[in-house]
Image (cartoon, rainbow, N blue to C red):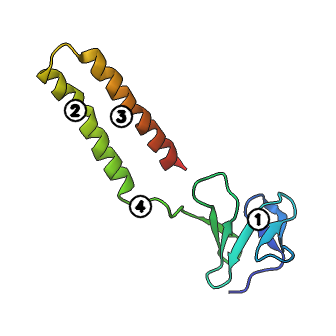
Amino acid sequence: MALPHPLPCPHCGSLGALNPLTLMEAIGCDRCQTWFSLNPDTDILEQIASATPAPRRWRWSGHRWQRLAPTHQSPWFLGATLLITLTLLWMPLLLNQAVPGLAPLWIVVFLGVVVLPGIMVWIAYRR
């Protein structure tokens, strides 16, 4: 597949153009200064330095860049997280029946073990 020259930047839109960086196997945008690596076999452009855990990737469609989904998350990730959360949700109720009167302690344990990691996983899954 032939790529146009100059390539439009997928990060800042069609405002910038991608140009090869001297003495590097990378290309960079002349407007937003973002660096990318391009795989010529698959026409996949990958952002080199990114604030997200998984680098952003794009594929050339013939007319524009199409954003690809991150590859670091497995399809079982959300299901396993939900199963663990539900298991930990019922644990304080079962343990409170075994030793009555410790409900405030189990609320604190629940908040520390389930809610806080659940929020962290939700934030990580959103990206």
Q: Distance between the Cα atoms at labels 3 and 2?
A: 11 Å
Query: Would you name the residue on which mark 2 appears?
Result: 90
Near mark 2 (Cα within 10 A), the count class, few <14, some 14-19 or many ≥20, is: few
In terms of depth relative to the viewer, which is nearer, 39 or 12?
39
In which quadrant of the rendered view does residue 4 lie? bottom right
Query: Would you name the residue on which mark 4 appears?
Result: 74
Q: Earlier in the sequence, mark 3 or mark 2?
A: 2
Hey, what amino acid is under mark 4? Ser
Q: Quadrant of the N terminus?
A: bottom right
Q: Which residue shows up at 77% across the image and 58% down it? A: 12
Query: Would you name the residue on which mark 3 appears?
Result: 114
Hey, what amino acid is under mark 3? Val
In terms of depth relative to the viewer, which is nearer, 59 or 111?
111
Q: Say left or right for 95 vs 8.
A: left
When the figure is inspected, residue 105 is found, relative to residue 29, above or below; the finding is above
Residue 101 is situated, as x and y percent measured from the top left of the image, at: 19, 13
Front tag of 4 and 3: 3
Q: Which mark is residue 35?
A: 1
